[in-house]
Image (tube, grey):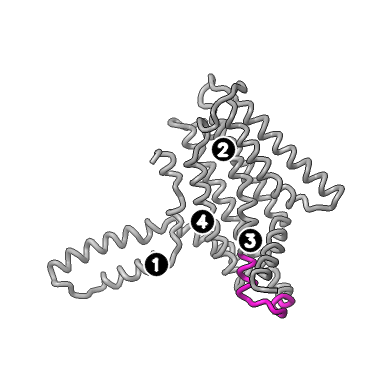
């Protein structure tokens, strides 16, 4: 078996192992419910309620993915190392690099599949819109298609679990995304009273693009979590992963503003003193090194630009 076959085999096994995890289903359901509840809660702002919903909804989806990355990485990597089951794999003609890469691909694909459910739920609720006034109408196509997708997912997962012994969490994850995608696409063609409208009128490419960028950042978080889980336990892996995420979101504030201020200060001093070396140069190198090492997740967070229509 070649490198590609080994890699795909490990990734496939890891993917199905991840989507069967109960914690994956719990976070998926909780984040989807939070996305739905964000709609009525966003109606209490003093400004544009729809912008508030977009901000809350995308933040919820992003945190869902970050938590899933930490949990899934520890579930499929750290537990195998702790239980010594990994020795059965690496004792075969499978290199450690192939094993870790396969685990990363499987975790990332499962992470994308699980995060797609609340992300599509967010898009569906966004089409419905926040009821900002008493005169606003409930958009029944979104409600009907969305509720139908949820009931079909739960019903199919229950059926497959009872009659065929399939994992309820796996079927829910793998079926929920496609059904919500169908519900979202269908809802684009109808207004609140079921009148036909052009789909491009309600489709927002900027939100889809922001979700895709979010998925790229989740791939980075997944890589960090998998790498940490090869050496540390579940609690430390989650703590360090979330700490790196928070610091990465604050990277511009922690490093970039200091770098800019020091560069301006050094340029003024160099012009006056002839470019002599001092501690400010050393501090500038340190901030630049930290800025280069720490992933800047703010690059992938474009919600502010979306809300400001930039």
Residue 51 point in image, percent of width and height: 47, 36
The alpha-carbon separation of the residues under discs 4 and 2 comes to: 23 Å
x, y percent for residue 15: 68, 60
Residue 193, label in figure: none
The quarter of the displayed image where residue 120 is located: top right
Q: Considering only vertical position in the picture, is 64 above or below 8?
A: above
Residue 279 placement: quadrant: bottom left
CB-based contact (under 8 Å), mark 3 and mark 1: no
**Residue that label 4 marks:** 217
Q: Please name the residue shown 65% across and 38% down the image.
A: 182
Mark 2 vs mark 1: which is more N-terminal? Answer: 2
What residue is drawn where x is 61% and y is 31%?
Answer: 187
Q: Earlier in the sequence, mark 1 or mark 4?
A: 4
| Residue 290 disc label | 1
Q: Count of labels shown? A: 4
Tell me the number on the disc at residue 107. 3
């Amino acid at each position: 078996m070649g490198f590609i076959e080994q890699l795909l085999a490990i990734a496939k096994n890891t993917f199905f192992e991840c989507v069967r995890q109960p914690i994956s289903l719990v976070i998926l359901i909780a984040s989807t419910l939070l996305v739905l509840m964000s709609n009525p809660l966003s109606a209490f702002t003093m400004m544009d309620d729809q912008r508030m919903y977009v901000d809350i909804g995308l933040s919820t989806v992003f945190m869902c993915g970050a938590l899933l990355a930490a949990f899934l990485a520890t579930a499929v990597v750290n537990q195998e190392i702790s239980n010594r089951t990994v020795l059965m794999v690496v004792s075969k003609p499978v290199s450690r690099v192939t094993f870790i890469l396969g685990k990363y691909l499987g975790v990332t694909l499962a992470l994308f599949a699980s995060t797609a459910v609340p992300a599509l739920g967010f898009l569906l609720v966004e089409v419905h819109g926040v009821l900002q006034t008493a005169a606003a109408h409930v958009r029944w196509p979104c409600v009907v298609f969305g509720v139908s997708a949820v009931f079909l997912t739960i019903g199919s997962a229950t059926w497959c679990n009872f009659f065929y012994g399939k994992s309820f969490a796996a079927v829910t994850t793998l079926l929920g995304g496609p059904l919500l995608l169908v519900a979202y696409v269908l809802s684009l063609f109808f207004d609140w009273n079921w009148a036909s409208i052009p789909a491009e009128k309600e489709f927002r490419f900027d939100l889809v693009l922001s979700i895709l960028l979010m998925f790229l950042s989740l791939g980075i978080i997944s890589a960090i979590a998998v790498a940490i889980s090869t050496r540390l336990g579940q609690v430390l892996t989650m703590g360090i992963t979330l700490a790196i995420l928070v610091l990465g979101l604050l990277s511009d504030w922690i490093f970039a503003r200091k770098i800019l201020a020091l560069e301006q200060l050094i340029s003024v001093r160099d012009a006056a003193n002839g470019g002599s070396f001092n501690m400010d140069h050393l501090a500038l190198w340190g901030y630049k090194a930290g800025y280069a090492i720490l992933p800047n997740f703010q690059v992938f967070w474009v919600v502010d630009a979306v809300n400001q229509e930039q």
